[in-house]
Every structure is written in structure tokens, then in C-alpha cells.
Image (tube, rainbow, N blue to C red):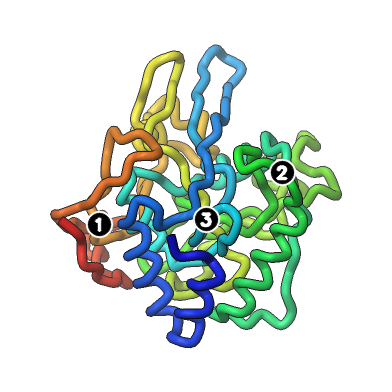
């Protein structure tokens, strides 16, 4: 298994396109990604409806647990990697709920100057997070690590939506203010101002498992995202219109979170008709 240190050493000087290609290639291997466990996240609307989702305890990373690198990615590459396993990105509401539930909360750490697609800064920021996480076990859900790349009803073709980076202090997540008021916002309010080619050290990829337990019965998480009456458990924007970013990789469905799936038929998941191919990087799928 390639370590995070080796990944940074081998690809650091080759540019971000090479990093993304290498990350996708590694993701197709059984041990290519850091094996962060999936942990249950239980949600309830107080009216008798519940959902138990599987949430990866940390962010998408390269390398074994003892030498990993949390790797920021464009939404297209992130979605392609997640599609290999049927995983999803979180909604803003799920990002908030993950923060509430996480027993390990770290203080957001901005880096100045922002060097954008800079491997050295990625490595340095990941190391700072490790220091804050300390000796917490791998299956302890962590939050506050980075801003989350999310799916949202403010998604636009060619844009990325980011949200999150809650801080332990001040303790704002339970202050009773509505989610759409500034007092309830994290450091990064929900935003679609950046093109999907924009990413930096602060962008994190959190995986949500493909199957949820809703009112005691299994349901594909993507169906829950889009359900006309139950989506409120996972979204405060109504049913999620586009649960995935455009990707040439066919999403795997009905797969346990730990199963690796190798797609053979590329397909584009479009956010809007006529815009499916915008910003998509082609990948060579393995048979």
C-alpha cells in the first residue's frame, strides 16, 4: 500500500492533474485508500421518522492509517472515486449533523498564505489535523477537519459547493437559530461561487455509505436524498435534485460500504441537461 508520505514525494512535483489521476488509480485498488471505518449516524425528525446512515470517520485519504494524507480533490474526481463504491458526498445538513454527533471535534486551522494546489501545504495541514486528533481511535467520528465538498440544491454546472468548518468554540451548533441565519453558520457558509476547478488545502471529501436504515428498513442513501417526504432527515433544502456531481464513472448501487466495485461502463451523471460533460476529466476504467 502506498503511504501518504510516498504519495506526496512521488507526485508532489508533478502537478495537480497527476495527483488526481494517481488518486483515482489507487482508489481502484482494494487497499488504495486509507481504511477509515464507517460509523453509524442516527437522525430523527421528532415525528417518528429515523434514519441511520453510515459515515466515514475521517476524510478521504491516501495511505495506511499510520501514514495517511488527507487529499483535497476537485468534485469530479472525488465523485468518480466515491462512485466506485456507491458512496455519496454529504449534504450541508449532514455536514452539520456530523459535527453535532462527532466525539472528536478539532479547531479549524487556516493556513496563510493559501497556496491553493500545493502538495506541501496539503501535507502540512493534514499533519496539523493529526496533532489535534491525537490518539483518538480510527472509528471515532471526527469533525471540524476541513470544509466539506457537498451536494446541494444550489449546485450549478461547472461549480463546486462547499460548506462547513464548524469550530468547537464558540459553541454555535445548538443555539436554536435557524440554519439560514448568520449566527448558525460555520466558518464556511454554503457557497457555489467557485468554479469546480477551484480547490485548496481546506477542501475535504467525506464519504457517506450507499445504504441507510430508514424507519427500520434498508433504503439506498441516494433514494433517501431524493425522497419526497423523508429527505428532510438528510437535507434542509428539500429533496436533493442532483445527488452527485458529474462523473464518467457509473455509480455502484446496493453495495456495502467496504466492497470495492470496478466499473466497466462509463456513464455521465448530469446535473442539468446539456451540461453533463462540462469540467469532466476522463478516466480509464478497469474491467
Considering the numbered disc 3 on the image, is that residue within a helix, a strand or a loop? loop
x, y percent for residue 118: 57, 81
Say above or below: 144 vs 93: below
Q: Residue at x 56, y 60 (%)?
A: 68
Which residue is more in the foreground, 109 or 27?
27
Q: Which residue is mark 2?
A: 136
x, y percent for residue 130: 70, 58
Residue 287 lies left or right of residue 215; in this view the side is: left
* Mark nearer the N terminus (1 vs 3): 3
Q: Residue at x 39, y 16 (%)?
A: 217
Q: For the residues marked 2 and 1, what is the alpha-carbon distance in whole angstroms?
A: 34 Å
Say above or below: 41 vs 203: above
Q: Which residue is mark 3?
A: 64
Q: Which residue is mark 1?
A: 249
Which residue is more in the foreground, 150 or 201?
201
Residue 118 lies left or right of residue 216; in this view the side is: right
Amino acid at each position: 500500500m502506498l503511504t501518504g508520505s510516498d504519495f506526496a514525494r512521488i507526485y508532489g512535483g508533478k502537478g495537480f492533474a497527476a495527483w488526481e489521476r494517481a488518486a483515482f488509480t489507487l482508489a481502484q485498488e482494494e487497499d488504495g485508500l486509507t481504511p477509515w471505518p464507517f460509523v453509524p449516524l442516527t437522525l430523527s425528525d421528532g415525528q417518528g421518522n429515523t434514519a441511520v446512515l453510515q459515515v466515514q470517520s475521517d476524510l478521504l485519504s491516501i495511505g495506511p492509517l499510520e501514514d495517511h494524507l488527507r487529499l483535497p480533490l476537485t468534485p469530479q474526481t472525488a465523485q468518480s472515486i466515491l462512485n466506485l463504491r456507491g458512496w455519496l458526498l454529504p449534504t450541508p445538513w449532514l455536514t452539520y449533523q456530523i459535527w453535532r454527533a462527532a466525539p472528536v471535534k478539532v479547531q479549524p486551522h487556516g493556513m496563510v498564505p493559501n497556496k491553493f494546489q500545493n502538495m506541501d501545504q496539503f501535507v502540512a495541514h493534514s499533519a496539523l489535523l493529526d496533532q489535534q486528533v491525537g490518539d483518538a481511535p480510527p472509528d471515532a467520528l471526527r469533525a471540524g477537519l476541513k470544509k466539506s465538498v457537498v451536494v446541494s440544491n444550489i449546485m450549478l454546472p461547472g461549480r463546486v459547493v462547499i460548506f462547513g468548518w464548524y469550530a468547537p468554540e464558540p459553541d454555535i451548533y445548538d443555539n436554536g437559530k435557524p440554519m439560514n441565519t448568520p449566527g448558525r453558520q460555520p466558518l464556511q457558509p454554503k457557497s457555489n461561487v467557485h468554479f469546480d476547478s477551484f480547490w485548496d488545502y481546506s477542501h475535504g471529501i467525506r464519504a457517506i455509505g450507499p445504504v441507510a436504515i430508514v424507519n427500520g428498513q434498508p433504503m439506498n442513501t441516494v433514494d433517501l436524498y431524493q425522497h419526497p417526504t423523508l429527505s428532510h432527515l438528510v437535507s434542509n433544502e428539500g429533496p436533493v435534485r442532483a445527488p452527485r456531481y458529474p462523473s464518467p464513472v457509473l455509480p455502484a448501487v446496493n453495495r456495502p460500504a467496504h466492497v470495492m466495485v470496478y466499473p466497466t461502463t462509463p456513464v455521465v451523471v448530469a446535473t442539468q441537461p446539456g451540461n453533463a460533460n462540462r469540467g469532466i476529466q476522463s478516466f480509464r476504467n478497469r474491467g
